[in-house]
Image (spheres, grey):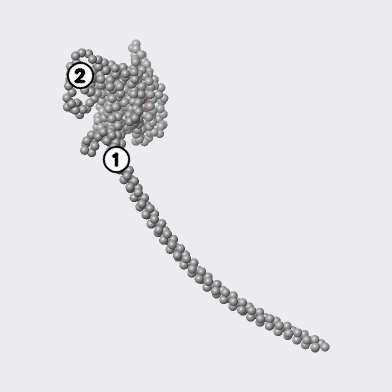
Amino acid sequence: MAAEGARHLLFQSHMATKTTCISSQVSDDEQRQQKRENVRSLAMGGHVGFESLPDQLVNRSIQQGFCFNILCVGETGIGKSTLIDTLFNTNFEDHESSHFYPHVKLKAQTYELQESNVRLKLTIVNTVGFGDQINKEESYQPIVDYIDAQFEAYLQEELKIKRSLCTYHDSRVHVCLYFISPTGHSLKTLDLLTMKSLDSKVNIIPVIAKADAISKSELHKFKIKLMSELVSNGVQIYQFPTDDETIAKINASMNGHLPFAVVGSMDEVKVGNKMVKARQYPWGVVQVENENHCDFVKLREMLICTNMEDLREQTHTRHYELYRRCKLEEMGLTDVGPENKPLSLQETYEAKRHEFYGELQRKEEEMKQMFVQRVKEKEAILKEAERELQAKFEHLKRVHQEERMKLEEKRRLLEEEIIAFSKKKATSEIYQNQTFMASGSNLRKDKDRKNSNFM
Ligand code: GDP
């Protein structure tokens, strides 16, 4: 943030002779308000010393160091790592990616670089496995999620009571280098979809990768085709700013060269009596830094030397601001009240708290009602069950009574039968005894008769 301040103050230093300094960043509304406040310009009698403010800021920024985060989006093997190595003239030792990842993964790596006394904390984010899946529909979602996650982390730091934004490692993506295959045809649907879903979140600089694979005339037509496709599909790519007159001309001309056709290589080849970065083929040498061969130098100039600070600033003032606004609105925070009256954070908080408690009470009441209703329903169900049980009980009681009466009747009949039987038995016993006795006396008579016959 100190560097942003430095930029503003450098602008202000042009105006140092005037005592009124109006920031280049203030909006039209603010400017109008400032005019209304009638700020007076005064001439000073002599040197005061605040003209050294820009120097103070530059010194502080140099002490703190800078950070820059690049997101490389493109298919595996399209030349992302090679181009980044070539851009920063170092070997970031990124390992070769496999083509067989089931999902797109984002791999971020941070490096500390130093050029003269300027320290740069550089984060390279690579899209591993991009475009390798059969179903490419969801390829861009992990990229969107990653960018949002970095905004969210920054927002959370900003919202903390104890903030440490000076030492905070800002991981928000400042630029997305979008690598387009040198097909010479048109953009792939995946490219359009991805760029469309990223353009409101990050500064996109499209590049035609491996530009040595396409002829000069084809490249010219390809660039025109790509730009017209981007425009017709409403994809907003980053435009180099033309508001600063010191760089307006070069930036305007570079905007006309987009998308840059790049070649990457860390190999050194002898051309004439000089060693240059190049790709050597049996038929010749493609020099990376030769503007007749490719746009690598244009990209490096625009990305690193001229517009790095603008990319950082755009990220903060445009993309992050949009994310922050949506997020805070989602949380219910607002700058104005119902009648468009400005609201302080305290008032918004109170209104929100009131609304929240109202909602809570409403929910509580709703739950109470629901509870009473449920209890009533349950009570009715239980009563019905009780009634059914009672009916069942009565029925069983009746059946039982009937059964008992039937059994009583059976018992009575059985007892009568037993009595009748006992009577019959007694009669038959008497009869048997009589018969027996009669037969005994008859036998005796026969015996006596037989005996008298013998004598
Ligand atoms: P990444 O997977 O996208 O990071 O791709 P790499 O940077 O690992 O490059 C994959 C292959 O492409 C390597 O063999 C590189 O040498 C080659 N390569 C990189 N840049 C270029 C280029 O500009 N032109 C050509 N023809 N090949 C390149």
Residue 282 in view (yes/no): no
Give coordinates of residue 245: x percent, y percent.
22, 20
Quadrant of the rendered structure where residue 218 is? Answer: top left
In the image, 44: left or right of 267? left
The residue tagged 2 is 19
Q: Nearer the viewer, residue 434 or 370?
A: 370
Give coordinates of residue 86: x percent, y percent.
35, 20
Q: CA distance from mark 1 to mark 2?
A: 47 Å
Sequence order check, earlier mark of 1 and 2? 2
Disc 2 crowd rating (10 Å Cα; few below 14, some 14-19, many 20+) is few
- Tell me the quarter of the image containing the N terminus: top left
Give coordinates of residue 238: x percent, y percent.
27, 26
Given the image, on which type of amino acid does mark 1 rest?
His
For the point 30% across and 34% down, the residue is 327
Given the image, on which type of amino acid does mark 2 rest?
Thr
The residue tagged 1 is 354
Q: Is residue 289 above or below residue 197?
A: above
- Tell me the quarter of the image containing the C terminus: bottom right
